[in-house]
Image (cartoon, rainbow, N blue to C red):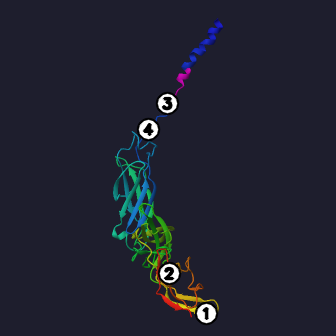
Amino acid sequence: MFRNRQFLAPLAALPLLLVGCASQGPVRPPSLHLPAAVRGLAATRVGNAVDLTWTNPVRTTDGVSLTGKHSAGVMQAEVCRAEVFTNANCTPITHLAATAGAAGGYHDVLPAPLAEGSARTLVYRVRLVNSAGSGAGWTEVKTAAGAAPEIVSDLRAKPVAQGVLVQWKPGGDGVMLRVSRGTNTARSTLLSASDPAKQLNGLSDGTLDTGGHVGEEQRYTVFRRRTVSLGGESFLMDSDAASVTVAASAKLPLPLPPTNVEALTNTLSTPEVDLVWQPPDDAGVTGYRVYREESGNTTLLTQEPLRGFTYADKSVANGHSYQYWVASVNGTGEQRSTSVRVTLP
């Protein structure tokens, strides 16, 4: 029994030893509630303005949530602008209300000295500050100051056989074109970048939107774009946009009719009438139909439109008189030529 009491005594003291070894770890200092740096800062130069976009942080610099009970209070975004920053601090040009985790943005209309002259670097700084006016370091992004490209002029659009032809007055900078179709104007598609030296019909620059559809409204937004190289970096400068709408009711106009239609009789063997015509100056024509009238009855001789400019009618008889028309065809309809009459001997 004595040996058993000696063995049990250490075991009885064991829980006290385990409890005595627990530790709370080092004490963390209180959060300074400094919002972390903004993310994804970008600058887009359009006309005489710069559009800044970014995403607000969701935590402080020491990892505390900005959306919980230990938030930084009312936050603001500060924006600075300069061609060159001479020190780590700057004087903001604006203060904006900010929400943790939300998208941030600012439309900065440039003062005249920054929107004129040759291209040069322009730097923006953005940071979030708490209710005490304190925040993390600045986040920087660069863009281009100087004169922007001129706005596109003489913009117009019209339906043609292959789609919608968009044209404008030629200029010295490349042209970008976006199109929004139907009622969803928020979604747009970049169609093409034009060659400044390219001309359509010798009159204006342009592009063909083969995705355009008759019966669906299309809104074309066109702007000139210049790429400039500054300090080893490339920046885009866009002009203000010009827009033109092709209404849903717009339809391809009827084609111009063929001209100089001639009918020649051939009686050397089987009776035959050979037709020949001059095609119209209309790029939208997709083919030609030939009609014949005899004794008040009109017959379509070509079920499928012809691609050429001649047709041989071998279903004629000697001693009969016939009248012929040739019609130009496009996606909207057809336009007939003047008639020509012939009598076989």
Please, is residue 94 above or below residue 201 in the view? above
Q: Please name the residue that numbered disc 3 is placed on.
A: 24
Quarter assignment of residue 125: bottom left
> Disc 3 to disc 1, how far (Cα)?
116 Å
Q: Dot 4 surroundings within 10 Å: few (below 14), some, or many (20 or more)?
A: few
Q: Please name the residue that numbered disc 4 is placed on.
A: 29
Could you say where residue 203 lies in the image, as x and y percent from the top left?
A: 45, 83
For residue 116, say whether it is visible.
yes
How many marks the image carries: the answer is: 4
- Picture residue at 61% right of the left edge, 12% below the top: 8
| 4 vs 1, front mark | 1
Q: Please name the residue that numbered disc 2 is placed on.
A: 298
Q: Dot 2 surroundings within 10 Å: few (below 14), some, or many (20 or more)?
A: few
The amino acid marked with disc number 3 is: Gln
| Furthest residue toward top | 1
Please, is residue 306 above or below residue 7 in the view? below
> Disc 4 to disc 2, how far (Cα)?
99 Å
